[in-house]
Amino acid sequence: MASTAVNRDFLFRRLHTLSGVIPVGLFLIEHLFTNATVTLGPGFYNEAVNTIQHIPFLHVVEFVFIFVPLTYHGVFGLYVAYTAGYNNRQFSWFRNQLFVWQRITGVLTFIFIVYHLWTTRFSGHEPNFAFVHNLVSNNFNFWFLIIGVVAATFHFSNGLWSFMVHWGITVGPRAQRISAIVMLTLFVILAGVGVDSVFTFRDTIV
Amino acid sequence: MAVREQELGTRQRTVRLIVERQEDAQSAVYTEEFEVPWRPGMNVIAALMEIQRNPVNSKGQPVRPVTWEMNCLEEVCGACMMVINGKPRQACSALVDQLTQPIYLKPARTFPVVRDLVVNRTRMFDALKRVKAWVPIDGTYDLGPGPKMAEAERQWAYELSKCFTCGACVEACPNVNEKTSFIGPFAISQARLFNTHPTGAMHKEERFEALLGEGGIHECGNSQNCVQVCPKGIPLTTSIAAMNKDVNRYAFSSWLRS
């Protein structure tokens, strides 16, 4: 059947928008708030990490709910960014600028996450406050984390706006305008939470 | 006296145009500048007609007259769509006095260029055929009157019916390019129009199938340029979001039923 190959495009695109929110977006929020426990004190952070470390079948959960969807969303996202045309110089309207920024922050976040995983999850170190403090004491790591957090939270918030359109939730212009305000507010909050944590990791001396 | 004044005015004022041209589909692209006499209330078409009457460029050299498409001259046919000062729009409703000069005219290059400002919009008509943008009423016997349409629905559906396939939305869409096969915003809106029509709705599954096929609705990236450039103010992004909902539901339920 000719349409099977063709319907695959539709499925891939829809899985891309879905995976960006569930589970990748949800994981991002969880991750940001776990890290934010550091603002209560290094002990709280170590405790939160310890709780996560003791989730049963952690490796399976990690692989199925984070690694697979994140890899899919990232790799397919690179393809989406590659096939898009960029005409924001000719058409400089707000939504078209965000269209471009969504793709820029997507690629940035992808590069950041690869580096982030390499220096944390796959670094062979125990995740705890001392390790992260040591990591962000390096200026490059610190600023790359800041950029990564801002890019990832923008990409998530603006992506959530798009998600609502792709799934026919916000249909009319008014609904989409309100959704844009809500999502940009969400971006500011999430970016604030993330950036605050990174600063706290660096500036807290035990 | 009034005539003399107008004549003086005509002699004093001119309109500068810079046109992106090419002899045919294969030949090299070049730009040419023209200066034509200004007339009150003139549109871009009137300026192009002026060039046709006296095909001499601003250096005074006789040149091949500029070719373009036009038909109704009142923004209902869509034929004279071209890129005017960077934006795709109808040349007939582009009034010279409202444009900054020199006026840059370019063909809508998202389509194959035939000659000068003339483009081939076959892909749009192919897209309309793909989504079956019509109400099928032909049969071997009299099918009788169709079901009635609610007035509240008719009112907004009428807005969608104003689409004249000019291609401005296709030209402005960043996801219509050589790397994708996106059919374009207008086709999605037309599928919605005919899915809303009570008789057209009898074939709505066929339109859903087309929209989740190659180059379908999933290729939209929400840049929303289409709704900005549409000369008829058609709520294209609303149509896309509404069809997203319907197509997703159709795809999911047909998958469960298969």
Image (cartoon, helix red, strand yellow):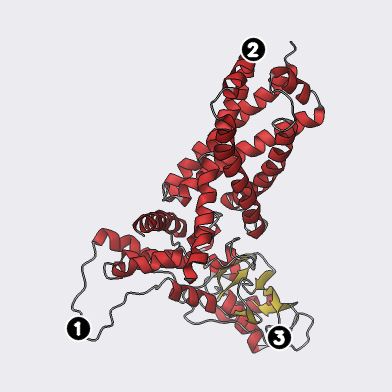
User: What chain does mark 3 sit on?
Assistant: B
Residue B244, image x and y in percent? 43, 55
**Which amino acid is tagged 3?**
Glu
Identified by mark 1, the residue type is Asp
| Tag in front: 2 or 1 | 2
Residue annotated with mark 2: A43
Q: Specify the quadrant of the image occupied by residue A84.
A: bottom right
Residue lying at 45% horizontally and 73% vertically, measured from the top left: B130
> Quick one: B76 or B150, which is closer to the camera?
B150
Q: Nearer the viewer, residue B65 or B251?
A: B251
Same chain, labels 2 and 1:
no
Q: CA distance from mark 3 to mark 1?
A: 51 Å
Seen from the viewer's position, the closer of residues B19 and B243 is: B243
| Residue B126 against residue A23 in the figure, above or below | below
Q: Which mark is residue A30?
A: none
Query: Residue A150 appears at what percent x and percent y?
Result: 66, 35
Callout 3: SS: loop
| Gap between marks 2 and 1 measured at Cα | 81 Å
Q: Nearer the viewer, mark 3 or mark 1?
A: 1
Specify the label residue B23 is tagged with: 3
Task: Please state which amino acid type lies under the numbered disc 2.
Answer: Gly
Spatial CA distance of label 2 from label 3 is 75 Å
Task: Say which mark, if any, is on residue B142.
Answer: 1
Label whose residue precedes the other's in the sequence (3 or 1): 3
Residue under mark 2: which chain is it in? A
SS type, badge 2? helix
Label 1 packing within 10 angstroms: few (<14), some (14-19), many (20+): few
- Position in image of residue A161 (x %, y %): 51, 44
